[in-house]
Image (cartoon, rainbow, N blue to C red):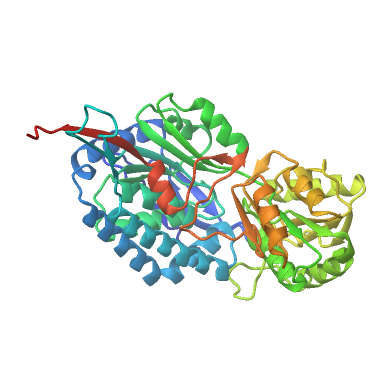
Amino acid sequence: MLKEVVKYPLDIRGVESTEFNEVKSPFNGEVVAAIGQADEKAIDTALTVAEDVFKNVMRQMPAHQRSEILHKTSKLLLEKKEDIARTIALEGGKPIKDARIEVSRAANTFLLASHEAMRLDGEQIPMDVTAGNENRIGMVLREPLGIIGGITPFNFPLNLVAHKVAPAIAAGNCIVLKPSSQTPIASIKLGAILKEAGLPDGVLQIIPCRGSKGNALVKDPRLAVLTFTGSPEIGWQMRRDAHAGTRLVLELGGNAGVIVHDDADLDLAVRGSVRGGYAHAGQTCISVQRVYVQKNVYKKFVDKFVEVVKTLKVGDPLDDSTDVGPLIDDGAVEKTLDWVEKATKSGAKVLSGGKVINNHLVEPVVLSDTKADMLVVCQEVFGPVVSIMQYETIDEAIAKMNDGRFGLQAGVFTSNLDVAFKAARSIDVGGVMVNDAPTFRSDHMPYGGRKESGLGLEGVRYAVHEMTQPKFICLNLNIK
């Protein structure tokens, strides 16, 4: 007997779903659900609704009410943790143990946002620094911007959605969200949870769609902020396409590097780099892709690294023991294998992995003898590939880390505080993790890239700042 496919129609006021898109598991190709698709007319309607709801609901909603909704959402996410984790594993192929971590992080993201909603404060500006202004008092308030457009990728279908939605609500905005067409179900379930928590209709509207239809959101002049997480090519094109009055927050790609100095705890560095390189099959923008190891400990590090990589279990994302699940689709598999092949033809050596097992599963790849101009080094692989290279001096390592178009996060392993600070101050990225992999992220910390890795900041407090605007008010008092 065939299993009935669950359908999720559009939830936009006055819009009926006429077209559905099947979401399939990247592991076995089974249909997970059918999702109602938004066309340009539906997107326009969603923006019109958002305008009305912002003006008549959100602008009047007090901070304590926004905070309470966000706090309830956090609790409900934890109550529904197993169901949502299973959804993430099914639609995106993320190993279930990592999917559970993502749900917990998303709950924390909403909890943080509930706190930020209560401390959205301004400042007093002393006006009497200039003669003649003795009776004036200045103040700065932070106000919501209006409609936020959020576009999210497949790899964190819940927590990266949370990083758009939770700060938008905390700041008092409405948000129109376009989730990845490959992994939209988690965001739809989040929308239902927010309603259960008391979020008014129209504050969050989800517009699943494929291809160029999303441009109707990007280009619309009613957007106050467009916040996007995804590839650099698409992100920078959005910057060109967005309306002149729309602010952009872009969290784009990277080819995260790690420095392992000769005084480092090698076991710690190996564990961090392996976890950082192969979590979610390398499909994160801060996945470890380049490891630079000081020459005199290079062989020892490589031997330990390969040994640990060979213990990783590649397989079914619903299996609790799986470490590395599938790549998202055929194109991701083909790109990964093609770039590894190009590297080996140019002199790189495969120390481990590289074979396709089945079901979009690729054995974790370890490369040596790679060069700076190889695609696996200078571009973003977004697959389970790590290149390990040598350096002699810390200045050489820093130069290699900075050689490229990206600048999201980096890792430095050393027991020498001077080396740590020199590297941290000199590496041109948004965040440097000392004695940790660049894959580390806590949801309250500032998170954003330099160079071609993005614009603006995420991290709940910082995203709230991006989604509000200052207003200066000056009182001229009649004091006698």
Tell me residue 205's x, y (percent).
34, 45
Quadrant showing the C terminus:
top left
Q: Residue furthest top?
A: 244
Q: How many marks?
A: 0
Tell me residue 244's x, y (percent).
43, 23
Q: Residue furthest front?
A: 131
Q: Residue furthest left?
A: 480
In the displayed structure, would residue 338 be above or below residue 471?
Answer: below
In this picture, residue 298 sits left or right of residue 154: right
Query: Which picture quadrant has residue 108?
Result: bottom left
Q: Does any portion of residue 207 appear in the rendered image?
A: no
- The residue positioned 56% from the left and 71% from the top of the image is 97
- Residues 311 and 90: in front is 311
Q: Does any portion of residue 39 appear in the rendered image?
A: yes
Tell me residue 350's x, y (percent).
87, 58
Tell me residue 413's x, y (percent).
72, 63
In the displayed structure, would residue 148 be above or below residue 24?
Answer: above
Query: Which picture quadrant has residue 441?
Result: bottom right
- The residue positioned 20% from the left and 44% from the top of the image is 57
- Residues 345 and 305: in front is 305
- The residue positioned 37% from the left and 35% from the top of the image is 43
- The residue positioned 63% from the left and 59% from the top of the image is 433
Query: Which picture quadrant has residue 251?
Result: top right
- Residues 2 and 315: in front is 315
In this picture, residue 193 sits left or right of residue 409: left
